[in-house]
Amino acid sequence: MEKEGGREKRKREEGSEEKVGKDAKKVKEGEKAVERPIVFFDVSIGSTPIGRIKFELFADIVPKTCENFRQFCTGEFKVANKPVGYKGSTFHRIGKGFGIQGGDFISGNGEGSISIYGSKFDDENFTVKHDGPGLLSMANSGPNTNGCQFFISCDVAESLNGSYVVFGKVIEDGLSVVRRIEEVTLIPGKDTPKLPVTITQCG
């Protein structure tokens, strides 16, 4: 995830969130209904809980990408019979007015990569655009290098379209938690939070 040269105008957040069912939302894909899984992060800054971020995953558009993220949320993916995923990992990179990045439970600094399909997997498609805040997108190091890292947009980011796969969105009141993360104090001269921003629970 690279910052754009200038900050694009922040869209109104009112009406950008959509309430969904308890576990999943069904959408029509041709003649069949496809469930859009709902997953969550409970987040703390330092030792202080700040709330829950809930996501609706676009399984009808990018099913492979969504399943990768979903299993890292639920702990279904295992290595040596031990659950591997986002619980206990941090948001290691904060770009105010741009996005918050996390998911590197391998190295914790943006260098780690693993997926349920191997170390990396291909870009599925770029159907959904980075057209507002609260979009969930894969972080990568170039074409077809998706792994475990992701970012949540804080604004419109049109320059990312065609390079990063959007696969979900923040729902309900989760965007308020994203905004709190966006405003954390950073280490001077860096985009790293001064206090750890941790996913304490997920599912």
Image: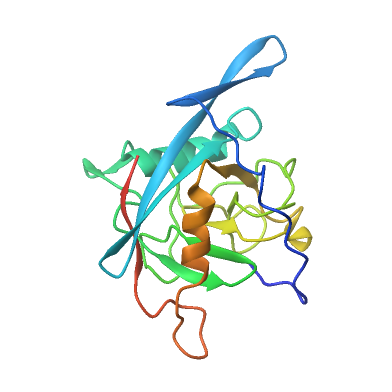
Query: Residue at the location (39% across, 38% down)?
Result: 71
Q: Position of residue 198 (x, y in %)?
A: 34, 62
In the drawing, does residue 157 fall left or right of residue 69?
right
Q: Position of residue 45 (x, y in %)?
A: 34, 67
Query: Residue at the location (75% across, 51% down)?
Result: 131
Q: Which residue appears farthest toward the top when viewing the image? A: 31
Q: Position of residue 20 (x, y in %)?
A: 53, 29
In the drawing, does residue 21 fall left or right of residue 142?
left
Above/below status of 143 relative to 115: below
Query: Residue at the location (43% across, 53% down)?
Result: 114
Q: Nearer the viewer, residue 32 or 7?
A: 7
Query: Residue at the location (30% across, 70% down)?
Result: 46
Q: Position of residue 105 (x, y in %)?
A: 36, 59
Above/below status of 22 relative to 139: above
The quarter holding residue 3 reads bottom right
**Quarter in which the C terminus is drawn:** top left
Q: Nearer the viewer, residue 24 or 150?
A: 24
Give the number of callouts: 0
Above/below status of 56 relative to 126: above
Q: Is residue 149 visible?
A: no
